[in-house]
Image: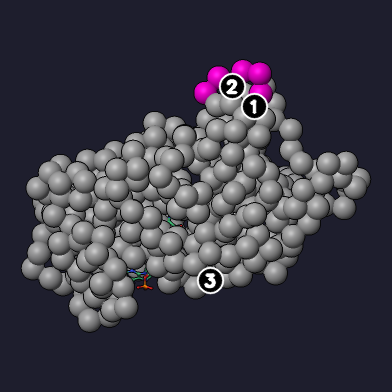
Amino acid sequence: MKRILKWIFRVVLVLLVLALLFVFVAYWRSTNDCGKTAAPTTPMKAIVYCDYGLANLKLADVEKPTPNDDQVLIKVRAASVNPYDWHFIEGTPKLMRLMAGLRKPTDTRIGGDVAGQIEAVGKNVTRFKPGDEVFGIGNGSFAEYCLGRSSLAAKPANMTFEQMAGVPVAGLTALQGIRNHGKVQAGQKVLINGASGGVGTFAVQIAKTFGAEVTGVCSTRNVDLVRSLGADHVIDYTKEDFTKSNERYDVILDNVGTQPLAGFKRVLKPNGILVMIGGGGPNEGQWVGPMARPVKAMLTSPFTSQKMGMMMAKGNKDDLAMLADLMQSGKVKPVIDRTYKLSEVPAAIAYLEEGHARGKVVITLE
Ligand SMILES: NC(=O)c1ccc[n+]([C@@H]2O[C@H](COP(=O)([O-])OP(=O)(O)OC[C@H]3O[C@@H](n4cnc5c(N)ncnc54)[C@H](OP(=O)(O)O)[C@@H]3O)[C@@H](O)[C@H]2O)c1
């Protein structure tokens, strides 16, 4: 028995050393194309970052991309910033560096949300042609041009590029949170925690289009804004803790992540649904970030009739088209907090990182 234990100990030790060696080698081999590429032959301006950290963002001349057979090239007219972007820029939570690059970001380009004009299409693309105005999720949209693939839809003619650039990630998250994860029905009581941010301003309006009775939670300065978006009730979180109220909700969308799970459970109806969307700043939960709460929820969910889970929005062209219809008809209106120029992306991200944006922060290009 003693000999077996000794051997198990040795095997575990060897595996541990090998794992550490693997991580060490992977860490030092993790690199990107910074400093390796020749001067671009067809240059364009783009925001790039060679190392993690907001201070490392810079405007540079890079090669204008060429679409492959299934891609389109978009002339960016506007983009918008999302917390998703600062997760990549800061490399937090650190767990995500397993995919994004252990030591340095593998992809040095940044930005997803885009609205612009199709410049060129790959030979398999039949949905769009050069000149079409589109919005959606591109690859490296903080640039004069970016590539796109399937997560694009036609821009409504009565909306500007700036207005539509703010829609993709935040709008998709709100729509999928309410419809797919919250399964919101007409007449249900829905609470949106963080109702004044990018996702929240869409969520309040979209929940209303589903016929819900909506309560928005925001700070004092945003009470009028959230009411103007159609919220039936507004709770000022600086004065009242909604988790202590006597109200009970069918669905809660949480964009903030600061309240303990027990508080949500208390104000959810017995068959209520908590949709965890996000929360936390760049310096909170450095290793796992907002992932700790969903794990806790997953462990407790089987023992209660209430459903609690985290969602991840998906780039879906049909949902983008639905959002375009809602915008075109005026049922959902964009809320734009500030606009910045391409060279000011670092300032735009720094503002978003403060966690108090009112609606969307948009980047405009000539
Ligand atoms: N799971 C997904 O697929 C997914 C997709 C998109 C976004 N997200 C995540 O969802 C979160 C929200 O995204 P976002 O784009 O809406 O961010 P955002 O635009 O930066 O939202 C910030 C808003 O949160 C409000 N807020 C801050 N503290 C609050 C509190 N204690 N109670 C209520 N509201 C509070 C702020 O309002 P005040 O100024 O009034 O405090 C501000 O309007 C982020 O963590 C993001 O990473 C997840």
What kind of element bears circle 1? strand
Residue 202 position within the rendered picture, expressed as x and y whole percent measured from the top left: 33, 53
**Apparent side of residue 78 relative to residue 167 in the rendered image (left or right):** right
Residue 167 position within the rendered picture, expressed as x and y whole percent measured from the top left: 43, 49
The residue where tag 3 is placed is 351
**Apparent side of residue 116 relative to residue 258 in the rendered image (left or right):** right
Report the amino acid beneath label 1. Val
**Apparent side of residue 151 relative to residue 297 in the rendered image (left or right):** right
Look at 55% across and 26% down and name the residue there. Answer: 128
Q: Which quadrant of the render holds ligand 1?
A: bottom left
What is the distance, in whole Å, between disc 2 and disc 3 at their CAs? 37 Å
Report the amino acid beneath label 3. Tyr
Look at 47% across and 34% down and name the residue there. Answer: 153
Look at 70% across and 56% down and name the residue there. Answer: 47
Q: Are marks 1 and 2 in contact (CB under 8 Å)?
A: yes
Residue 272 position within the rendered picture, expressed as x and y whole percent measured from the top left: 16, 50
Which one is closest to the eye, mark 1 or mark 3?
Answer: 1
What is the distance, in whole Å, between disc 1 and disc 3 at their CAs? 35 Å
What secondary structure is the magenta-colored segment mainly? loop
Residues in magenta, as a range:
122-127
Q: Is residue 126 magenta?
A: yes
What kind of element bears circle 2? loop
The image's mark for residue 246 is none
Q: Residues within 10 Å of mark 1 (few under 14, many from 20)?
A: many
